[in-house]
Amino acid sequence: MVVSGRDTPHEYDKLFALNTRAPFLLTAALAPAMTEKGNGAVINVLAISAHRGFPGVSAFGGAKAAVASFTRTWAAEFAPAIRVNAVDLGTIRTPLHDDDADLLASLEPAIPARRIGTPEEVAAAITFLASDEDSYISGAILPVDGGLLATF
């Protein structure tokens, strides 16, 4: 069985283990200590494919959509001791894209910022969500996508 051209059952299992099971297990392991301390922050990492369908990424998008649900559910479940938020990534320039310069260039015109995001911009968003400046934000999903989700 193949869905979306490349998502075999093995690929599905790998994607869900990495993108859904790992954050679930990490949060389950750390939440009791954060709750006991009375303070903590969980920051999940999503992708815009959790909210918007793209051909060929059904398993990845589904896994990230599950984590979006975790984010909102855990924000309600762990309040007030733990804030739970997520960053929602658009196209970010990483070493995985080193061989895709033409692809990245072709995506830029569709992004309102007219450029690809950087890992430093992702780190800045995560740093904010982990900081005390974020003390009244929980259950939020912060797009780090150059405005792309706003165009859908």
Image (spheres, rainbow, N blue to C red):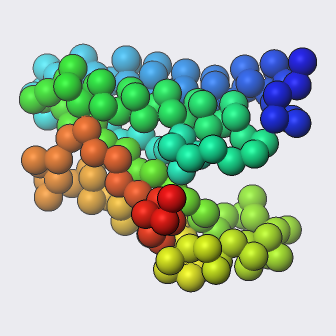
Identified at 17% across, 53% down, the residue is: 134
Q: Is residue 47 left or right of residue 4?
A: left
- Judged left or right of residue 103, residue 116 is left
In this rendered view, identify the residue nearer to me: 102 or 134: 102
- Give the answer, above or below, for where 65 lies relative to 9: below
The percent position of residue 2, horizontal first and vertical second, equals: 88, 25
Seen from the viewer's position, the closer of residues 121 and 68 is 68
Whether residue 144 is visible here, answered yes or no, is no
Give the quadrant of the N terminus: top right
Q: Is residue 140 left or right of residue 61?
A: left
Apparent side of residue 140 relative to residue 122 in the rendered image (left or right) = left
Compared with residue 70, is residue 121 higher up or lower down, i.e. above or below? Answer: below
Name the foreground residue: 86 vs 98.
Answer: 86
> In terms of image quadrants, where is residue 131?
bottom left
Q: Position of residue 44 (x, y in %)?
A: 41, 40
Residue at far front of view: 152
Question: At 88% from the left edge and 36% from the top edge, which residue is drawn?
Answer: 5
Closer to the camera in the image, 152 or 95: 152
> Residue 92, can we see it?
yes
At 79% from the left and 70% from the top, the residue drawn is: 103
The number of numbered discs placed on residues in the rendered structure image is: 0
Horizontal and vertical percent position of residue 12? 74, 24
Q: Position of residue 92 (x, y in %)?
A: 59, 64
Task: Write the residue at 14% across / 58% down.
Answer: 133
13 over 138 or under it: above or below: above
